[in-house]
Image (cartoon, rainbow, N blue to C red):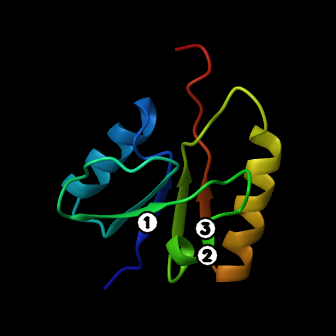
Amino acid sequence: MTSPVLVTGGTGRLGRRVVDGLVDSGCDVRVLARHEREMAPAVRFFMGDLRRGDGIDAAMSGVGTVVHCATSTKGDADATRILVTAAVQAGSQHLVYPSIVGN
């Protein structure tokens, strides 16, 4: 059995597509987002805020891979720093940081 994949910003423009692809591939998917949204039944949703560090530890527990799709008009560097620290502390082995810059 593989460890879960956490998608930050999994309700956003890029994140929704990443989540759909992971679910279609049979992955155990978790989503961390600031605002609750309806998700596919196969997805476990966690509400949190990367800039404040809220909700990250619960979402990160047991996760092997993080796909960081969350973005904002300000505070991205701090949010990413908080996420990377949480991933290291949780023992996550992979962090993928795609970008939609230019789309």
Seen from the viewer's position, the closer of residues 92 and 7 is 7
Image label count: 3
What is the secondary structure assignment of the residue under circle 3?
helix
Residue 94 rendering spot, x and y as whole percentages = 60, 66
Q: Residue at x 62, y 46 (%)?
A: 97
Q: Name which residue lies at 41% across and 79% down.
A: 3
Percent of width and height locating residue 2: 36, 80
- How far apart are the alpha carbons under marks 3 and 2? 4 Å
Q: Secondary structure at mark 1?
A: strand
Residue type (three-letter) at the residue carrying disc 1: Val
Q: What is the crowding at mark 3: few (fewer than 14 residues within 10 Å), some, or many (at least 20)?
A: many
Question: Residue at the spot x=42%, y=29% of the render?
Answer: 13
* Residue designated by label 2: 57
Are circles 3 and 1 on residues that touch, CB within 8 Å?
A: no
| Residue 100, picture quadrant | top right
Q: Residues within 10 Å of mark 2 (few under 14, many from 20)?
A: some
Label 2's element?
A: helix
Point out which mark residue 81 bears: none
Q: Residues within 10 Å of mark 1 (few under 14, many from 20)?
A: many
Read off the residue under disc 3. Answer: 56
Q: Does the image show residue 93?
A: no
First in residue order: circle 3 vs circle 1: 1
Q: Which residue is at a point 73% across and 50% down the rendered structure image?
A: 51
> What's the residue type where badge 3 is placed?
Ile
Q: Where residue 5 is drawn, which disc sits there?
A: 1
Q: Earlier in the sequence, mark 2 or mark 1?
A: 1
Q: Nearer the viewer, residue 51 or 60?
A: 51
Q: Is residue 46 left or right of residue 25?
A: right
Residue type at the position of mark 2 = Asp
User: Is 84 left or right of 49, judged from the image as shown?
Assistant: right
The Cα atoms of the two marked residues, 3 and 1, are separated by 13 Å
